[in-house]
Image (spheres, helix red, strand yellow):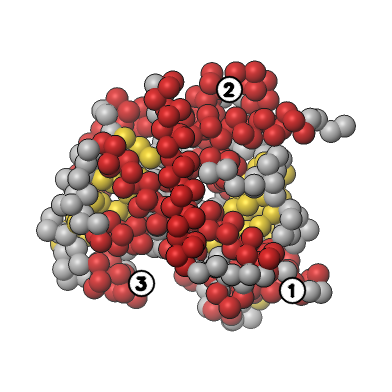
Amino acid sequence: MGADLSYVHPTANSPWGTYLSQVDRVVPYLGDLARWAETLKRPKRALIVDVPIEMDNGTIAHFEGFRVQHNMSRGPGKGGVRFHPDVTLEEVMALSAWMTVKTAAVNLPYGGAKGGIRVDPKKLSQKELEKITRRYTSEIGIIIGPHTDIPAPDVNTNAQIMAWMMDTYSMNIGGTATGVVTGKPLHLGGSLGRVKATGRGVFVTGREAARRLGLDLRGARIAVQGFGNVGSVAAELFVEAGAKIVSVQDHTGTIVNENGLDLKALIPLSRADGLVSFKGGDVIANEAFWDVACDILIPAALEGQITAERAKKTTAKLVLEGANGPTVPVADDILAERGVLVVPDVICNAGGVTVSYFEWVQDFSSFFWDEDEINVRLDRIMMNALNNIWDTADKHKITLRTATFAVACERILMARQERGLYP
Ligand code: GLU
Protein backbone atom coordinates (compact mmCIF):
# COMPACT_ATOMS: atom_id res chain seq x y z
CA MET A 1 0.00 0.00 0.00
CA GLY A 2 2.70 2.54 0.95
CA ALA A 3 2.10 5.96 2.50
CA ASP A 4 2.20 4.75 6.06
CA LEU A 5 0.72 7.88 7.59
CA SER A 6 0.68 8.04 11.39
CA TYR A 7 -2.69 9.79 11.56
CA VAL A 8 -4.91 7.26 9.76
CA HIS A 9 -5.33 3.51 10.07
CA PRO A 10 -6.92 2.29 6.85
CA THR A 11 -8.04 -1.30 6.35
CA ALA A 12 -8.44 -3.14 3.04
CA ASN A 13 -12.07 -2.08 2.63
CA SER A 14 -12.12 1.27 4.43
CA PRO A 15 -12.39 4.38 2.22
CA TRP A 16 -8.72 5.37 2.35
CA GLY A 17 -7.64 1.71 2.07
CA THR A 18 -9.90 1.35 -0.98
CA TYR A 19 -8.40 4.45 -2.55
CA LEU A 20 -4.80 3.31 -1.87
CA SER A 21 -5.40 0.00 -3.59
CA GLN A 22 -6.96 1.79 -6.56
CA VAL A 23 -3.75 3.84 -6.83
CA ASP A 24 -1.60 0.69 -6.58
CA ARG A 25 -3.46 -0.78 -9.53
CA VAL A 26 -2.70 2.17 -11.77
CA VAL A 27 1.02 2.50 -11.03
CA PRO A 28 2.09 -0.06 -13.70
CA TYR A 29 0.44 2.14 -16.36
CA LEU A 30 2.10 5.40 -15.37
CA GLY A 31 5.48 4.87 -17.06
CA ASP A 32 8.15 7.31 -15.85
CA LEU A 33 5.56 9.31 -13.95
CA ALA A 34 5.35 6.42 -11.46
CA ARG A 35 8.26 8.15 -9.75
CA TRP A 36 5.75 10.71 -8.48
CA ALA A 37 3.02 8.25 -7.51
CA GLU A 38 3.60 8.58 -3.76
CA THR A 39 2.22 12.12 -4.12
CA LEU A 40 -1.20 10.58 -4.70
CA LYS A 41 -1.02 8.63 -1.44
CA ARG A 42 -0.70 11.65 0.83
CA PRO A 43 -3.04 14.59 1.18
CA LYS A 44 -1.32 17.91 0.67
CA ARG A 45 -3.04 19.45 3.69
CA ALA A 46 -5.63 18.34 6.26
CA LEU A 47 -7.33 20.68 8.71
CA ILE A 48 -9.26 19.46 11.75
CA VAL A 49 -11.46 22.05 13.44
CA ASP A 50 -13.61 22.22 16.55
CA VAL A 51 -17.11 23.49 15.77
CA PRO A 52 -18.84 24.67 18.95
CA ILE A 53 -22.42 25.98 18.81
CA GLU A 54 -25.03 26.99 21.33
CA MET A 55 -28.00 24.64 20.92
CA ASP A 56 -31.62 25.82 21.12
CA ASN A 57 -31.86 24.40 24.67
CA GLY A 58 -28.97 26.58 25.86
CA THR A 59 -26.30 23.86 26.05
CA ILE A 60 -22.98 24.12 24.21
CA ALA A 61 -22.28 21.29 21.75
CA HIS A 62 -18.97 20.60 20.03
CA PHE A 63 -18.62 18.87 16.64
CA GLU A 64 -15.60 17.64 14.69
CA GLY A 65 -15.07 19.38 11.36
CA PHE A 66 -12.60 18.58 8.58
CA ARG A 67 -11.32 20.05 5.33
CA VAL A 68 -8.76 18.06 3.40
CA GLN A 69 -6.95 19.39 0.34
CA HIS A 70 -5.64 16.27 -1.29
CA ASN A 71 -3.94 17.75 -4.32
CA MET A 72 -3.71 21.14 -6.01
CA SER A 73 -1.27 20.41 -8.81
CA ARG A 74 -3.79 21.19 -11.55
CA GLY A 75 -5.70 24.03 -9.89
CA PRO A 76 -7.53 25.03 -6.71
CA GLY A 77 -8.98 22.36 -4.45
CA LYS A 78 -12.56 21.41 -5.28
CA GLY A 79 -15.07 19.20 -3.52
CA GLY A 80 -18.15 19.03 -1.39
CA VAL A 81 -18.91 19.25 2.30
CA ARG A 82 -20.71 16.36 3.96
CA PHE A 83 -22.77 16.47 7.16
CA HIS A 84 -23.06 12.94 8.52
CA PRO A 85 -22.70 11.27 11.93
CA ASP A 86 -20.10 8.80 10.56
CA VAL A 87 -17.75 11.39 9.01
CA THR A 88 -14.09 10.79 9.93
CA LEU A 89 -10.77 12.28 8.85
CA GLU A 90 -10.01 9.05 6.99
CA GLU A 91 -13.27 9.21 5.05
CA VAL A 92 -12.77 12.87 4.13
CA MET A 93 -9.22 12.08 2.98
CA ALA A 94 -10.51 9.39 0.62
CA LEU A 95 -13.30 11.60 -0.66
CA SER A 96 -10.82 14.43 -1.29
CA ALA A 97 -8.52 12.07 -3.19
CA TRP A 98 -11.40 10.82 -5.35
CA MET A 99 -12.12 14.49 -6.16
CA THR A 100 -8.51 14.89 -7.39
CA VAL A 101 -8.96 11.91 -9.69
CA LYS A 102 -12.46 12.99 -10.77
CA THR A 103 -11.59 16.56 -11.73
CA ALA A 104 -8.58 15.28 -13.68
CA ALA A 105 -10.61 12.52 -15.36
CA VAL A 106 -12.99 15.09 -16.87
CA ASN A 107 -10.11 17.54 -17.33
CA LEU A 108 -11.41 20.40 -15.16
CA PRO A 109 -8.71 22.84 -14.00
CA TYR A 110 -9.00 21.79 -10.36
CA GLY A 111 -7.32 19.69 -7.72
CA GLY A 112 -9.29 17.74 -5.15
CA ALA A 113 -10.57 18.59 -1.68
CA LYS A 114 -13.40 17.58 0.61
CA GLY A 115 -14.90 18.63 3.90
CA GLY A 116 -17.25 17.31 6.49
CA ILE A 117 -18.76 17.67 9.91
CA ARG A 118 -19.41 14.68 12.14
CA VAL A 119 -23.05 15.46 12.93
CA ASP A 120 -26.53 14.13 12.24
CA PRO A 121 -28.13 17.21 10.66
CA LYS A 122 -31.58 15.64 10.95
CA LYS A 123 -31.31 16.17 14.69
CA LEU A 124 -30.59 19.91 14.35
CA SER A 125 -33.12 22.74 14.12
CA GLN A 126 -32.79 25.12 11.17
CA LYS A 127 -31.14 27.70 13.46
CA GLU A 128 -28.64 25.13 14.77
CA LEU A 129 -27.91 24.01 11.19
CA GLU A 130 -27.15 27.60 10.23
CA LYS A 131 -24.89 28.09 13.26
CA ILE A 132 -22.90 24.90 12.67
CA THR A 133 -22.47 25.78 8.99
CA ARG A 134 -21.33 29.32 9.73
CA ARG A 135 -18.91 28.37 12.50
CA TYR A 136 -17.43 25.55 10.38
CA THR A 137 -17.01 27.91 7.41
CA SER A 138 -15.31 30.49 9.56
CA GLU A 139 -12.93 27.84 10.97
CA ILE A 140 -11.94 26.50 7.54
CA GLY A 141 -11.93 30.07 6.16
CA ILE A 142 -8.16 30.16 6.59
CA ILE A 143 -7.69 27.65 3.78
CA ILE A 144 -10.68 28.08 1.42
CA GLY A 145 -11.23 30.79 -1.18
CA PRO A 146 -12.33 31.27 -4.81
CA HIS A 147 -8.77 30.63 -6.02
CA THR A 148 -7.59 28.17 -3.39
CA ASP A 149 -10.35 25.71 -2.48
CA ILE A 150 -14.02 25.82 -3.45
CA PRO A 151 -16.53 23.76 -1.40
CA ALA A 152 -19.87 22.50 -2.75
CA PRO A 153 -22.82 20.36 -1.63
CA ASP A 154 -22.44 16.67 -0.82
CA VAL A 155 -24.38 14.23 1.41
CA ASN A 156 -26.92 16.20 3.53
CA THR A 157 -25.82 19.64 2.34
CA ASN A 158 -27.70 21.82 -0.15
CA ALA A 159 -28.05 25.26 -1.76
CA GLN A 160 -29.18 26.93 1.50
CA ILE A 161 -26.08 25.66 3.29
CA MET A 162 -23.93 26.94 0.41
CA ALA A 163 -25.62 30.36 0.74
CA TRP A 164 -24.69 30.48 4.45
CA MET A 165 -21.13 29.40 3.61
CA MET A 166 -20.82 32.06 0.92
CA ASP A 167 -22.22 34.71 3.27
CA THR A 168 -19.95 33.75 6.18
CA TYR A 169 -16.82 33.76 4.04
CA SER A 170 -17.90 37.04 2.45
CA MET A 171 -18.58 38.72 5.82
CA ASN A 172 -15.12 37.69 7.01
CA ILE A 173 -13.37 39.21 3.99
CA GLY A 174 -15.62 42.26 3.82
CA GLY A 175 -16.98 41.66 0.31
CA THR A 176 -19.21 39.30 -1.64
CA ALA A 177 -17.26 36.32 -2.97
CA THR A 178 -19.79 34.25 -4.90
CA GLY A 179 -17.00 32.08 -6.35
CA VAL A 180 -15.99 30.65 -2.97
CA VAL A 181 -18.60 27.86 -3.11
CA THR A 182 -20.66 26.23 -5.84
CA GLY A 183 -24.13 24.71 -5.69
CA LYS A 184 -25.53 28.05 -4.49
CA PRO A 185 -29.15 29.22 -4.95
CA LEU A 186 -29.80 30.59 -8.45
CA HIS A 187 -30.17 34.24 -7.46
CA LEU A 188 -26.89 34.14 -5.50
CA GLY A 189 -24.64 33.19 -8.37
CA GLY A 190 -25.83 29.60 -8.66
CA SER A 191 -26.06 27.85 -12.01
CA LEU A 192 -29.02 26.41 -13.85
CA GLY A 193 -28.70 22.65 -14.10
CA ARG A 194 -26.47 22.25 -11.01
CA VAL A 195 -29.01 20.43 -8.83
CA LYS A 196 -29.66 17.75 -11.44
CA ALA A 197 -26.12 17.62 -12.83
CA THR A 198 -24.79 14.62 -10.89
CA GLY A 199 -27.83 12.47 -11.68
CA ARG A 200 -27.69 13.62 -15.28
CA GLY A 201 -24.02 12.60 -15.56
CA VAL A 202 -24.87 9.16 -14.14
CA PHE A 203 -27.55 8.84 -16.83
CA VAL A 204 -25.35 10.07 -19.70
CA THR A 205 -22.45 7.76 -18.84
CA GLY A 206 -24.84 4.90 -18.05
CA ARG A 207 -26.69 5.25 -21.35
CA GLU A 208 -23.41 5.12 -23.27
CA ALA A 209 -22.19 2.10 -21.27
CA ALA A 210 -25.50 0.32 -21.89
CA ARG A 211 -25.24 1.05 -25.60
CA ARG A 212 -21.74 -0.41 -25.75
CA LEU A 213 -22.92 -3.49 -23.83
CA GLY A 214 -25.89 -3.94 -26.16
CA LEU A 215 -28.25 -3.50 -23.20
CA ASP A 216 -31.53 -1.95 -24.34
CA LEU A 217 -32.71 0.70 -21.87
CA ARG A 218 -36.32 0.11 -22.91
CA GLY A 219 -37.65 -2.26 -20.30
CA ALA A 220 -34.30 -2.48 -18.47
CA ARG A 221 -34.73 -3.16 -14.74
CA ILE A 222 -32.88 -0.77 -12.44
CA ALA A 223 -32.24 -0.94 -8.69
CA VAL A 224 -31.21 2.30 -6.96
CA GLN A 225 -29.59 2.60 -3.54
CA GLY A 226 -29.84 6.14 -2.17
CA PHE A 227 -32.70 8.33 -3.27
CA GLY A 228 -31.35 11.83 -2.74
CA ASN A 229 -30.23 14.31 -5.30
CA VAL A 230 -28.22 11.76 -7.28
CA GLY A 231 -30.28 8.54 -7.21
CA SER A 232 -33.70 10.09 -7.75
CA VAL A 233 -32.62 12.30 -10.66
CA ALA A 234 -30.77 9.46 -12.41
CA ALA A 235 -33.83 7.22 -11.86
CA GLU A 236 -36.16 9.78 -13.46
CA LEU A 237 -33.94 10.13 -16.53
CA PHE A 238 -33.67 6.36 -17.00
CA VAL A 239 -37.47 6.06 -16.75
CA GLU A 240 -37.81 8.75 -19.44
CA ALA A 241 -35.53 6.57 -21.59
CA GLY A 242 -37.89 3.60 -21.13
CA ALA A 243 -36.32 1.76 -18.18
CA LYS A 244 -38.19 0.77 -15.01
CA ILE A 245 -37.07 1.23 -11.43
CA VAL A 246 -37.71 -2.12 -9.74
CA SER A 247 -36.24 -1.35 -6.32
CA VAL A 248 -35.18 1.67 -4.30
CA GLN A 249 -33.43 1.79 -0.95
CA ASP A 250 -32.91 4.81 1.28
CA HIS A 251 -32.03 5.29 4.95
CA THR A 252 -35.63 4.48 5.94
CA GLY A 253 -35.87 1.14 4.12
CA THR A 254 -36.24 -0.73 0.84
CA ILE A 255 -39.15 -1.13 -1.57
CA VAL A 256 -39.67 -3.24 -4.68
CA ASN A 257 -42.11 -3.45 -7.54
CA GLU A 258 -41.08 -5.66 -10.44
CA ASN A 259 -43.44 -3.76 -12.77
CA GLY A 260 -41.65 -0.51 -11.99
CA LEU A 261 -42.15 2.03 -9.20
CA ASP A 262 -44.16 5.17 -9.93
CA LEU A 263 -41.51 7.85 -9.42
CA LYS A 264 -43.90 10.79 -9.72
CA ALA A 265 -45.65 9.61 -6.57
CA LEU A 266 -42.58 8.17 -4.87
CA ILE A 267 -40.18 11.11 -5.09
CA PRO A 268 -42.26 13.71 -3.20
CA LEU A 269 -43.28 11.13 -0.60
CA SER A 270 -39.70 9.98 -0.04
CA ARG A 271 -38.70 13.61 0.65
CA ALA A 272 -41.46 14.01 3.22
CA ASP A 273 -41.69 10.66 5.06
CA GLY A 274 -39.02 8.36 3.60
CA LEU A 275 -39.62 5.54 1.16
CA VAL A 276 -41.37 3.00 3.30
CA SER A 277 -44.64 4.93 3.57
CA PHE A 278 -45.11 4.42 -0.21
CA LYS A 279 -48.03 2.15 -1.07
CA GLY A 280 -47.08 1.41 -4.69
CA GLY A 281 -44.47 -1.23 -3.81
CA ASP A 282 -43.64 -3.92 -1.26
CA VAL A 283 -41.32 -3.26 1.65
CA ILE A 284 -38.51 -5.82 1.87
CA ALA A 285 -35.57 -6.35 4.25
CA ASN A 286 -32.65 -4.05 3.46
CA GLU A 287 -30.24 -6.89 2.70
CA ALA A 288 -32.74 -8.35 0.18
CA PHE A 289 -32.12 -5.27 -2.00
CA TRP A 290 -28.97 -6.97 -3.32
CA ASP A 291 -30.98 -10.02 -4.45
CA VAL A 292 -33.54 -8.08 -6.49
CA ALA A 293 -33.35 -9.15 -10.14
CA CYS A 294 -32.09 -6.16 -12.13
CA ASP A 295 -30.04 -5.24 -15.20
CA ILE A 296 -28.53 -2.03 -13.85
CA LEU A 297 -27.51 -1.30 -10.26
CA ILE A 298 -27.02 2.31 -9.17
CA PRO A 299 -25.33 2.69 -5.76
CA ALA A 300 -25.96 6.37 -4.98
CA ALA A 301 -25.56 6.49 -1.21
CA LEU A 302 -22.35 6.01 0.78
CA GLU A 303 -18.99 4.21 0.53
CA GLY A 304 -18.34 0.51 0.99
CA GLN A 305 -21.80 -0.73 -0.01
CA ILE A 306 -20.82 -3.29 -2.65
CA THR A 307 -19.02 -5.91 -0.61
CA ALA A 308 -17.67 -9.25 -1.84
CA GLU A 309 -20.89 -11.02 -0.84
CA ARG A 310 -23.13 -8.53 -2.59
CA ALA A 311 -20.92 -8.49 -5.67
CA LYS A 312 -21.27 -12.28 -5.91
CA LYS A 313 -25.04 -12.22 -5.92
CA THR A 314 -26.06 -9.17 -7.92
CA THR A 315 -27.78 -10.00 -11.21
CA ALA A 316 -26.89 -6.59 -12.67
CA LYS A 317 -24.83 -6.45 -15.86
CA LEU A 318 -23.96 -2.81 -15.33
CA VAL A 319 -23.10 -0.89 -12.14
CA LEU A 320 -23.26 2.91 -12.23
CA GLU A 321 -21.48 4.45 -9.25
CA GLY A 322 -23.49 7.54 -8.37
CA ALA A 323 -21.95 7.45 -4.87
CA ASN A 324 -18.28 8.00 -4.11
CA GLY A 325 -16.39 4.82 -3.25
CA PRO A 326 -19.36 2.42 -3.13
CA THR A 327 -17.37 -0.67 -4.24
CA VAL A 328 -14.62 -2.22 -2.10
CA PRO A 329 -11.55 -3.53 -4.01
CA VAL A 330 -12.27 -7.24 -3.56
CA ALA A 331 -15.83 -6.70 -4.81
CA ASP A 332 -14.45 -4.81 -7.80
CA ASP A 333 -12.44 -7.91 -8.73
CA ILE A 334 -15.45 -10.18 -8.31
CA LEU A 335 -17.59 -7.96 -10.53
CA ALA A 336 -14.85 -7.90 -13.18
CA GLU A 337 -14.51 -11.70 -13.06
CA ARG A 338 -18.26 -12.08 -13.39
CA GLY A 339 -18.29 -9.78 -16.44
CA VAL A 340 -20.26 -7.04 -14.70
CA LEU A 341 -19.27 -3.66 -16.12
CA VAL A 342 -18.65 -0.92 -13.53
CA VAL A 343 -18.71 2.74 -14.55
CA PRO A 344 -16.61 4.06 -11.67
CA ASP A 345 -17.55 6.98 -9.40
CA VAL A 346 -14.65 9.13 -10.61
CA ILE A 347 -16.29 9.43 -14.03
CA CYS A 348 -19.89 8.34 -13.41
CA ASN A 349 -20.74 11.02 -10.83
CA ALA A 350 -18.47 13.75 -12.24
CA GLY A 351 -21.46 15.65 -13.66
CA GLY A 352 -21.92 17.52 -10.37
CA VAL A 353 -18.44 18.95 -10.20
CA THR A 354 -18.52 19.69 -13.93
CA VAL A 355 -21.52 21.99 -13.54
CA SER A 356 -19.89 23.35 -10.36
CA TYR A 357 -17.04 24.37 -12.64
CA PHE A 358 -19.53 26.06 -15.00
CA GLU A 359 -21.02 27.88 -11.99
CA TRP A 360 -17.60 29.11 -10.87
CA VAL A 361 -16.74 30.31 -14.40
CA GLN A 362 -20.11 32.10 -14.65
CA ASP A 363 -19.54 33.77 -11.26
CA PHE A 364 -16.19 35.16 -12.37
CA SER A 365 -17.53 36.48 -15.65
CA SER A 366 -20.86 37.60 -14.09
CA PHE A 367 -22.52 36.24 -17.19
CA PHE A 368 -24.96 33.37 -16.87
CA TRP A 369 -25.78 30.67 -19.39
CA ASP A 370 -29.15 29.11 -20.15
CA GLU A 371 -29.91 25.56 -19.11
CA ASP A 372 -29.63 24.10 -22.61
CA GLU A 373 -26.13 25.45 -22.98
CA ILE A 374 -25.16 23.94 -19.63
CA ASN A 375 -26.61 20.53 -20.43
CA VAL A 376 -25.07 20.41 -23.91
CA ARG A 377 -21.64 21.30 -22.53
CA LEU A 378 -22.05 18.83 -19.65
CA ASP A 379 -23.02 15.98 -21.96
CA ARG A 380 -20.10 16.75 -24.27
CA ILE A 381 -17.53 16.78 -21.46
CA MET A 382 -18.88 13.55 -19.96
CA MET A 383 -18.98 11.73 -23.31
CA ASN A 384 -15.51 12.86 -24.37
CA ALA A 385 -14.05 11.81 -21.03
CA LEU A 386 -15.82 8.45 -21.07
CA ASN A 387 -14.77 7.66 -24.66
CA ASN A 388 -11.16 8.52 -23.88
CA ILE A 389 -11.25 6.29 -20.78
CA TRP A 390 -12.85 3.48 -22.75
CA ASP A 391 -10.06 3.62 -25.34
CA THR A 392 -7.49 3.41 -22.54
CA ALA A 393 -9.30 0.43 -21.00
CA ASP A 394 -9.38 -1.36 -24.35
CA LYS A 395 -5.74 -0.59 -25.08
CA HIS A 396 -4.42 -2.02 -21.80
CA LYS A 397 -7.22 -4.55 -21.19
CA ILE A 398 -8.00 -3.02 -17.81
CA THR A 399 -11.20 -2.09 -15.98
CA LEU A 400 -12.84 1.29 -16.53
CA ARG A 401 -11.81 2.22 -12.98
CA THR A 402 -8.12 1.58 -13.56
CA ALA A 403 -8.40 3.27 -16.97
CA THR A 404 -9.98 6.35 -15.38
CA PHE A 405 -7.20 6.43 -12.80
CA ALA A 406 -4.63 6.02 -15.60
CA VAL A 407 -5.99 8.98 -17.61
CA ALA A 408 -6.43 11.14 -14.50
CA CYS A 409 -3.19 10.27 -12.70
CA GLU A 410 -1.17 10.93 -15.83
CA ARG A 411 -2.62 14.46 -15.95
CA ILE A 412 -2.07 15.04 -12.23
CA LEU A 413 1.49 13.72 -12.12
CA MET A 414 2.44 15.43 -15.38
CA ALA A 415 1.40 18.74 -13.78
CA ARG A 416 3.31 17.75 -10.63
CA GLN A 417 6.44 17.02 -12.62
CA GLU A 418 6.22 20.16 -14.77
CA ARG A 419 5.71 22.38 -11.74
CA GLY A 420 8.66 20.71 -10.01
CA LEU A 421 9.37 20.43 -6.32
CA TYR A 422 9.61 23.63 -4.30
CA PRO A 423 12.21 24.55 -3.12
N1 GLU B 1 -19.96 16.53 -3.88
C1 GLU B 1 -19.91 16.33 -5.29
C2 GLU B 1 -18.94 15.22 -5.64
O1 GLU B 1 -18.68 14.34 -4.84
C3 GLU B 1 -19.65 17.62 -6.06
C4 GLU B 1 -18.43 18.38 -5.67
C5 GLU B 1 -18.32 19.75 -6.32
O2 GLU B 1 -19.23 20.15 -7.04
O3 GLU B 1 -17.32 20.40 -6.07
O4 GLU B 1 -18.48 15.13 -6.74
Classify residue 388 as left or right of residue 59.
left
Residue that carries the numbered disc 1 in the rendered image:
176
Secondary structure category for the residue under label 2:
loop
Residue 4 in the image, given as x and y percentages of width and height:
64, 28
Q: Which mark sits nearer the N-terminus, 1 or 2?
A: 2
User: Mark 3 or 2, which is nearer the eye?
Assistant: 2
Q: Which mark sits nearer the N-terminus, 3 or 2?
A: 2
Q: Which mark is residue 30?
A: 2
Residue that carries the numbered disc 3 in the rendered image:
271
User: Mark 3 or 1, which is nearer the eye?
Assistant: 1
Q: CA distance from mark 3 to mark 2?
A: 45 Å
Q: Is residue 318 above or below residue 221?
A: above
Classify residue 353 as left or right of residue 296.
right
Residue 100 in the image, given as x and y percentages of width and height:
60, 42
Can residue 81 be seen from the camera position used here?
Answer: no
Residue 371 in the image, given as x and y percentages of width and height:
47, 67
Question: What residue is rendered at 39% in x and 21% in y?
Answer: 397
Q: Which mark is residue 397?
A: none
Q: CA distance from mark 3 to mark 1?
A: 32 Å
Amino acid identity at mark 1: Thr
Q: Nearer the viewer, residue 378 or 141?
A: 378
Which image quadrant: the C terminus?
Answer: top right
